[in-house]
Image (cartoon, rainbow, N blue to C red):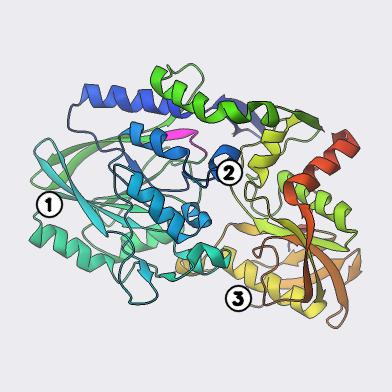
Amino acid sequence: MHQELFWDGSTPRHQLVGGYSRIAQLLEDAYQENPDRVLALDCGDTIHGTYPVVKSRGEVMIPILNKMGFKAMTGHWEFAYGPKQFEKITKKLKYPMLAINCYQEKNDSLVFPPYTIQEAGDLKIGVIGIAATIVDKVMPPHFSQDIYFTLGRNELPEYIRRLREEENVDLVVVMSHLGFPQEFKLAQEVDGVDLLLSAHTHNRLYHPVYVNETIIIQSGCHGSFLGRLDLEVEDRRVKSYQHKLITIRKDLTPHPEMEEMVNHAMDPHREMLGEVVGETQTYLHRNTILESTMDNFLLKSILKETGSQVAFSNGWRYGAPIPPGPVTMEDLWNIIPVNPPVSTVKISGKEIWEMLEVNTELTFSRDPYQQMGGYLKRFMGLNLYLKLENPAGERIQQIFIQGKPVKPDTIYHAAFVTSQGVPPTYGQNRSDSEVKAVDALKNYISSEKKISAELKGTVTLV
């Protein structure tokens, strides 16, 4: 289990939740209650995010996922090991990876099947997958080597027609990793989707959204929740539905066999991951869109390693929160499981301004299809003043670096992690240090003993 953040009035609180063993037991209970009438589907970001998974390049998850009884999945961070490795993993799974929008560069053929047809009782259900469109646009280049992604908007109507008219399905379900704003617009524009399982933006939808006769649900992140939707179907239409966003609480019964499988995956790493490296006085999390305490810890660490004037990292959403108290190596790996090198670059004030304008548009675009976050890029040593209601390219009012107005022609020394921190189109003299991000975090907290990483007001909406 892991900590999860829950807002309580004006303050965050934490609670131990999650775990494959408890999710597996909930699914098994559902299978027994409704034999042959349950479809368990996975919308992605599953085969990544923790040390054992990343160290094994996803392989450690295969027996665990096969035990869960899923019928299909789509993906996003699963591509972090490179498309070839992900394809290798999918061939060992007992269910298909689906994507109508992932293509081979060499011949424009689909990398994965676009849909599967499942039976639930006397119903035929067509399940369509849409992978994260941002993989080849804002993620590191190796995620999309030799493949490319579309939005899936143009392809979707034809697959719906095929399923309804040629395959004669009763219901059409879309699993999508585009993000809730994108999927809401998609449902408005495309007819014929009965149920849209949304992902990517970590929304906790306690009540389904209904638009254009499509039911949309999204079920949080980190395996902290399970979305359950019970449908009553009559004449190929959803007559009624009941939804519950289930918090995977500690008091839920774990599945004994799954608990043993998870322990088997974790046991070789427990001693290393359990090492206490320091203490935090700040609640570290990424549940705020403009600035986060977890990333302030990361940014402080890479600034200390490099002595730079300013530091940048991506506006990641993932990472189980860390409440005040002891911090372990497992916590550090959960902050940045890709563990990239700490990098530096010489970058002009003009480039910083442009980079942040572009990032602001990718985060807050008025057209959901152009939103490609993550949250807003994280930074330290810099203050940004924004008017979000302004048109793209005209939102930034002022930028200060080290308390002084940024000068377009001045060259600044910046530190960053991954190409999402500072994309390769910006700056000169890029260099990767020998220090990796997790080491930088460990060095910083070990030297400080007790860290504070409160919000500093680096972004002001004016």
Q: Earlier in the sequence, mark 3 or mark 1?
A: 1
The residue pinned by badge 3 equals 392
Amino acid type, callout 3:
Ala
Task: Name the residue located 42 percent from the left edge and 69 percent from the top edge.
Answer: 147
User: How would you classify the magenta stretch by its main secondary structure?
Assistant: loop
Q: Secondary structure at mark 2?
A: helix
437, above or below 449, in the image: below
Q: Secondary structure at mark 3?
A: loop
Tell me the crowding category of disc 3: few under 14, some 14 to 19, or many 20 or more residues within 10 angstroms, Cα based: some
Judge whether residue 76 can be spotted in this image. yes
Which sits in the foreground, 317 or 86?
86
Which label was assigned to residue 55?
A: 2
* Of labels 2 and 1, the one closer to you: 2
Q: Quadrant of residue 86?
A: bottom left
In the drawing, does residue 447 fall left or right of residue 258? right
Amino acid type, callout 1:
Val
The residue pinned by badge 1 equals 169
Task: Name the residue located 31 percent from the left edge and 39 percent from the top edge.
Answer: 70
Magenta residues (range): 222-226
> Is residue 50 rendered magenta in the image?
no
76, above or below 366, in the image: above
412, above or below 187, in the image: below
In the drawing, does residue 84 fall left or right of residue 160? right
Q: Badges 3 and 1: C-beta atoms under 8 Å apart?
A: no
Tell me the crowding category of disc 2: few under 14, some 14 to 19, or many 20 or more residues within 10 angstroms, Cα based: few
In the drawing, does residue 114 fall left or right of residue 404? left
Q: Earlier in the sequence, mark 2 or mark 1?
A: 2
